[in-house]
Image (cartoon, rainbow, N blue to C red):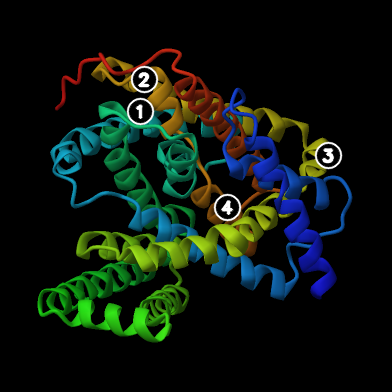
Amino acid sequence: MGFATLAVISLAALLGPLLALPRRWALPVVLGELVAGVLLGPTALGYLDARNPTFSFLADIGFALIMFVAGAHVPVRDASLRAGLRTGTLRAVAVGVLAAGAGLAVARLFGTGHAALYAVLMASSSAALVLPIVDSLGLDGGPVLRMLPQVAVADTACIVALPLVIDPDHAARAALGALAVVGCAVLLFFVLRRLERGGYQRRLHQLSERRSFALELRISLVLLFALAALAVRTHVSIMLAGFSFGLVVAAVGEPRRLAKQLFALTEGFLGPLFFLWLGASLDLRELAHHSSFVLLGLVLGLGAVAVHAAMRATGQPVAIGTLAAAQLGVPVAAATLGSQLGLLAPGEAAALMLGALVTIAAATAAGSMLARGAGSPAANAEPFA
């Protein structure tokens, strides 16, 4: 992988802003980046090889940063968000219960024996995808704010649960790894909060701004990559490392200067590179040789949308529930880990990603509808609140 490839990737990443430019379409930026990756990957042109070690490593960095930014953007210090934590948690649990039944039914229908895996996939939400959609489309209001803790809880729970259900023989190891990453994140929270209350963070910020040292960014990257290294070492997804550290930074208080620096680093290069890598990692032609898995992917995607949209019974607007169904990291990790361990049948990994694409398409449509003001959720009741 050389500079010419990076130039092509950077050029292709412009498809995201171009598709998002017309306001009447209300499309998220990540959609164009995913489409560009699919077109440049083995599905169409075959120019990008997602198995290239350099490309994969840069994508991992981008993924860690995306999850970090996603966690840092969760307004955990917002009183109204904390008030909605109970509602979001109950909805995430309710979705999980429905997904467990749906996963069992899908596994029996297709005879794969992966009921627990399908349940986790359908119950998952992707903060890395939902939060950029919310930000890029300017969505706000009570129902959107109450959805954020639901997404955060579901994302975190499914990130932790995935290695346990996909590789039960090493479930204890994965559980210990997740505990180690979360424990380190909690320790970092207390340390950073102590430094912030002692005025050290303010003095560091003033020195960094006065001397243009970018110290906050440098230190944040050190801590993020250290957590990611621990996650890799303990066989846990870097999603958990990035998202948990992002929540820590959000809880302590993210400086504006750091937010701008992270925005430039993530949204300007490594984030789009990750989404292009994700699109390039899909070989949708593989499904042509395993036609039954096309139906599996569609069923998984529609099932995920259905169990999330079912939260309409709790007062959540269908469009908000559909937006919360968006999947990204968990299906990617499931397809990657399952393929590496030889646990998935030929074509099944592509089916998992097809299901994720269905949820992304549904979430994109729901976000566009909300952005246009159709089906405004402002007046809906919230029985769980």
CA–CA distance in space, label 4 to label 2: 25 Å
Nearer mark to the viewer, of 4 and 1: 4
- Amino acid, disc 3: His
| First of labels 3, 4 by sequence position | 3
Which residue lies at the image location 48% right of the left edge and 58% below the top edge? 66
Q: Which residue is mark 3?
A: 289
Q: Quadrant of residue 205?
A: bottom left
Answer whether residue 168 is visible to the viewer in this image: no
| First of labels 2, 3 by sequence position | 3
Report x, y in % for residue 288: 82, 36
Vertical placement of 379 versus 249: above or below? above
- Amino acid, disc 1: Leu
CA–CA distance in space, label 2 to label 3: 34 Å
- Quarter of the image where the N terminus is located: bottom right
Residue 98 badge: 1
Are discs 1 and 2 less than 8 Å apart at CB? yes
Which residue lies at the image location 32% right of the left edge and 22% below the top edge? 311
Q: Residues within 10 Å of mark 4 (few under 14, many from 20)?
A: some
Q: Provide the secondary structure element on which disc 4 rests.
A: helix
| First of labels 4, 2 by sequence position | 2
Q: Which residue is mark 2?
A: 310
CA–CA distance in space, label 3 to label 1: 31 Å
